[in-house]
Image (cartoon, grey):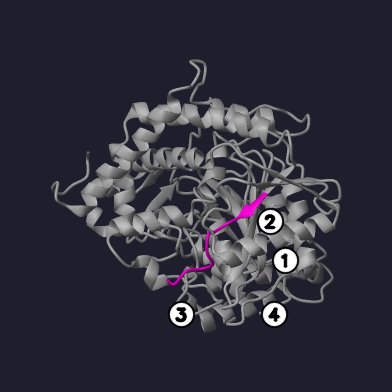
């Protein structure tokens, strides 16, 4: 855990507990995933489920934004 | 600012030269001067810039040029949208936290459509937090009841519209951040389908969960704003190329199938919230819509998947701030970001795979049966601000999760979701409902929304404004 502070720090305890809880949920949920389920399947599901017969081309993942952005 | 001022009404009046963009802009600036010290909706007000733009739009009208229905109308943007000439604090202690080579595409599209930009709006720090409190810029409050939450994270976006400080605003929604403040402030907020509105020039909190969308006084105004900002943008790699089709949103709802969830969404609500949402469903049924009770696929899991994905992605984006200047962050914001640093690659990837499964299952099982789903937005009306900030950081983080539990599943699923008013509680706080549709079917979501709005008697301003 990258959080700063000692093990007795209540905030760090909250961080560790929250991450562990989420990991446990995912472990249970992933138990019955098919091998073919892929991380990018979410956007595919959106386009597939969309109504109408308009273009189904999804956001072009290869057309990554060439514009720089940063946080300070 | 008049209570009956809406974008649609004023846009027609401007085009017909019955009112000047300068007059409208001055009215909003006067309302900001009068009310914003108390409401804390704005971080930056660009009065001179707005006046200059309003004069230019007025000159265009007089020369016979009207750019569209938003010509000369005052809008404002959440302070995570980069707009040339103004700092972008993102609600942090750093005046210009987010820097980018490009301006916010949605803001640029509004400007090119003739809208007048008034300034940048308050928000929860880094768009993390559903209550609208902000230790650096002041806590935004709902204009409906003193000392109560504005909702977040697009707090200023909702307050400004409710109080008449601006007539339309941009917000962003990663776990409910457009819909929660809309619900707390009694205005309309639309989270479009993932990919429908460009995120270019907007501070990312979580790439795959972030949505940009409008807040406005009426459903029609939200539709006008969406019509301008939606559509493919090559600057956003996740922007969909699917054509924007909002036709049909004024059609009656007779024959539409409306799903009312039997599981999760009505658990543990304050009774007035449940009563108002169920009454809205019955009203829509009287207009000919067919109600169907149904079980929706595991919303609690969808919420948890969204939480894990958002934590991991936000930690990746804001790691430098968390590691180098953690003491500048509000404790709950810092804690949530640090959780993301503790998420493993394995869990993140499994969450994305579960998300794909949930999205497919929801589309098949729910939209095979109904056209939209109707649900509450928040489990309780705008809570007391001091109460939501009280206790340990664990208390606050837990409270944040509970308050956004009805909105987060639809970020995970990427579905269009409209929040709109549905009455007022006995003690004067706004109540709200949420209409969720198929991917890219914002038209049907708006159609149901406007049908309900007609039934409810239209926009109702807060008494304090």
Q: Answer with left or right where residue B304 lies relative to residue B463.
A: left
Q: Mark 2 lies on which chain?
A: B
Tell me, for residue B420, which label it has, or none: none
The kind of secondary structure element at disc 2 is helix
Name the residue beneath numbered marker 2.
Answer: B225
Give the main secondary structure, helix, strand or loop, of the magenta stretch.
loop
Q: What residue appears at the point 75 percent right and 69 percent down from the top-left corner? A: B458
Packing grade of label 4 (10 A; few <14, some 14-19, many >=20) is few
Q: Gap in Å between the C-alphas at discs 2 and 1?
A: 9 Å
Packing grade of label 2 (10 A; few <14, some 14-19, many >=20) is many
Q: Gap in Å between the C-alphas at discs 3 and 1?
A: 25 Å
The answer to which quarter of the image holds residue B231 is top right
Q: Which of B5 and B289 is in front in this view?
A: B289
Quarter containing the C terminus of chain B: bottom right
Q: Which of the marked residues, 2 or 1, is nearer the chain's N terminus?
A: 1
Count of number-bearing discs: 4
Q: Which of the marked residues, 4 or 1, is nearer the chain's N terminus?
A: 4
| Residue A25 is covered by the magenta coloring | no
Residue B194 is situated, as x and y percent measured from the top left of the image, at: 59, 40
Q: Are marks 3 and 1 on the same chain?
A: yes
Q: Which of the marked residues, 3 or 1, is nearer the chain's N terminus?
A: 1
Q: Mark 1 lies on which chain?
A: B
Name the residue beneath numbered marker 1.
Answer: B7
Q: Gap in Å between the C-alphas at discs 2 and 4?
A: 20 Å
Q: Gap in Å between the C-alphas at discs 4 and 1?
A: 12 Å
Residue B365 is situated, as x and y percent measured from the top left of the image, at: 66, 32
Q: Gap in Å between the C-alphas at discs 3 and 2?
A: 27 Å
What segment is highlighted magenta in the picture? B374-384
Q: What residue appears at the point 52 percent right and 78 percent down from the top-left corner? A: B145
Find out whether the residues at labels 3 and 1 contact each other: C-beta distance under 8 Å: no
| Residue B378 is covered by the magenta coloring | yes
Q: Nearer the viewer, residue B364 or B339?
A: B364
């Amino acid at each position: 855990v990258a959080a700063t502070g000692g093990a007795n720090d209540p905030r760090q305890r909250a961080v560790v507990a929250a991450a562990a809880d989420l990991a446990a949920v995912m472990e249970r949920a992933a138990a019955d995933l098919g091998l073919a389920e892929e991380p990018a399947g979410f956007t595919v599901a959106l386009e597939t489920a969309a109504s109408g017969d308009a273009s189904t081309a999804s956001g072009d993942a290869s057309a990554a934004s060439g514009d720089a952005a940063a946080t300070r | 600012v008049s209570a009956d001022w809406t974008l649609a009404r004023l846009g027609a009046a401007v085009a017909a030269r019955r009112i000047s963009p300068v007059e409208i802009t001055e009215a909003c600036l006067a309302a900001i001067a009068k009310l914003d010290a108390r409401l804390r909706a704005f971080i930056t007000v660009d009065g001179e810039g707005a006046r200059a733009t309003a004069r230019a739009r007025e000159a265009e009208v007089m020369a016979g040029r009207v750019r569209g229905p938003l010509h000369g109308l005052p809008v404002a943007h959440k302070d995570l949208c980069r707009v040339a000439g103004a700092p972008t604090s993102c609600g942090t202690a750093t005046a210009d936290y987010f820097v980018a080579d490009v301006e916010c595409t949605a803001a640029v599209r509004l400007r090119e459509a003739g809208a007048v930009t008034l300034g940048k709006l308050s928000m929860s720090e880094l768009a993390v937090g559903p209550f609208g409190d902000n230790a650096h810029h002041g806590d935004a409050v709902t204009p409906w009841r003193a000392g109560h939450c504005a909702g977040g994270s697009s707090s200023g976006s909702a307050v400004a519209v409710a109080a008449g400080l601006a007539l339309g605003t941009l917000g962003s929604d990663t776990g409910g951040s457009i819909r929660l403040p809309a619900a707390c402030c009694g205005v309309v907020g639309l989270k479009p389908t993932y990919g429908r509105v460009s995120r270019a020039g907007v501070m990312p909190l979580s790439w795959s969960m972030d949505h940009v969308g409008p807040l406005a006084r009426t459903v029609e105004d939200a539709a006008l704003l969406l019509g301008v900002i939606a559509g493919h943008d090559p600057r956003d790699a996740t922007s969909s190329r699917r054509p924007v089709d909002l036709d049909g949103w004024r059609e009656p709802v007779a024959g539409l199938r409306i799903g009312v969830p039997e599981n999760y969404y009505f658990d543990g609500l304050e009774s007035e919230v449940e009563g108002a949402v169920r009454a809205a469903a019955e009203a829509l049924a009287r207009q000919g819509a067919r109600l169907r009770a149904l079980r929706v696929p595991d919303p609690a899991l969808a919420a948890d998947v969204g939480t894990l994905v958002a934590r991991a992605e936000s930690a990746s984006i804001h790691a430098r701030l968390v590691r180098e200047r953690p003491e500048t962050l509000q404790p709950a914001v810092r804690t949530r970001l640090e959780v993301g640093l503790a998420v493993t690659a394995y869990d993140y990837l499994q969450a994305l795979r579960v998300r794909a499964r949930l999205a497919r299952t929801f589309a098949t099982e729910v939209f095979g049966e109904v056209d939209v789903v109707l649900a509450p937005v928040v489990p309780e009306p705008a809570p007391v601000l001091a109460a939501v900030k009280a206790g340990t950081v664990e208390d606050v983080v837990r409270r944040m999760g509970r308050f956004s539990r009805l909105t987060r599943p639809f970020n995970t699923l990427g579905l269009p979701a409209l929040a709109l008013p549905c009455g007022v509680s006995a003690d004067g706080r706004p109540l709200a409902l949420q209409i969720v549709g198929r991917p890219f079917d914002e038209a049907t979501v708006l159609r149901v929304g406007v049908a309900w709005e007609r039934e409810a008697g239209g926009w109702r301003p807060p008494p304090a404004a």
